[in-house]
Amino acid sequence: MHNPAKMNDTPKWLEKLARVGFATKGTLYAIIGVLALMTAIGEGGQTGGSSDAIQKIAQQPFGKALLVLTAIGLFAYALWRFVQSAMDPENEGTDGKGVAKRIGYGVSGLMHAFLGVNVVQMLMGSGGSGGGSKQTYVAKIMAIDTVGPILIGLLGAIVVGVGIYQITKAWKVKFAEKLKTGEMSRKVQEVAIKAGRAGLTARGIVFGIIGGFLVKAAITHNPGQTKGVGEALAEIGSQSYGAILLGLVAAGLVAYAVHQFVFARYRKIPA
């Protein structure tokens, strides 16, 4: 059920934080995509996820200052997601579809807040979560008698569903509804549409692979099957014509970064 009276509740400072968050997310995906693209064309690089991108940022000149900015951006994005989930400034509503979206926003907020905490831990010298943490968490859940594998299987199915939703959103161009097209030139609109389509499709493919391996982990009772973004990209690269496929998906992730930068500037945020 929608409530138009709830629109325009977002304070100006939160709008600015949300835009910082979109830009930070775009930066991380740009690093992920470029590194994977370099791997695909044989120019070094690596297939990694957000944590690996953060490590790359830390290795740059003025790395600590960049990490501080990254942490601020991640917490800003997390806060925006929590507001979307709890306060519903964009009027998603309380029907089944609206509730599902708002739960998704909350989960996204938790994930980005967790990444922000990892960055703070790096700044404090205590390190972040290790590469095997995903498998560790899955193993703990799967250890809950017969319920554990079922929960992991359901989680995997949900992640696959999110991937399919991303691809559907890409080709229906639903993301354009959230853009301030009146402030965009025709050229910028074209770039925004193309980047959004390619980026959401690539991200949907990666989510589908991650979800598929979660389902496999549940069926085989093997937490080692769990994969993150980096492992999903490596899986793509290991297939027949893997370099070509990895290159296409990597380019798509760079496009997703552009999509996030477009959101940072032109997304409609009730304020």
Image: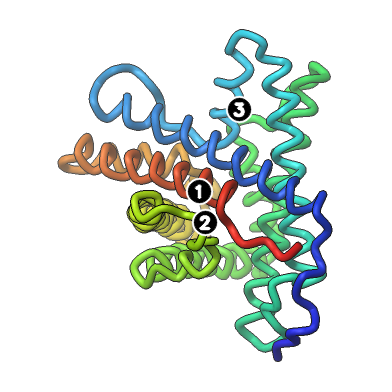
Residue 127 position within the rendered picture, expressed as x and y whole percent measured from the top left: 74, 22
* Element type at mark 2: helix
User: Can you give x and y, in whole percent of width and height, for residue 252 in the image?
Assistant: 35, 45
Q: Do the residues labelled 1 and 3 touch (CB within 8 Å)?
A: no
The percent coordinates of residue 179 (x first, y second) are 52, 61
Which residue type carries mark 2?
Answer: Glu
Taking 23 as reference, is 152 above or below it? below
Q: Is residue 1 left or right of residue 229?
A: right
Q: Nearer the viewer, residue 95 or 239?
A: 95
Contact flag, marks 3 and 2 (Cβ < 8 Å): no
Location of residue 160 with respect to 209 vertically, above or below: below
Quadrant housing residue 81: bottom right
Residue at position x 75%, y 25% in the image: 68
Q: Earlier in the sequence, mark 1 or mark 3?
A: 3
| 3D distance between C-alphas at marks 3 and 2 | 32 Å
**Drawn side of residue 249 relative to residue 53, left or right:** left
Foreground mark, 1 or 3, reads: 1
Q: Name the residue under label 2.
A: 183
Which residue: 46% across, 65% down? 176
Q: Nearer the viewer, residue 157 or 261?
A: 261
Residue 262: image tag: 1
- At mark 3, the secondary structure is helix
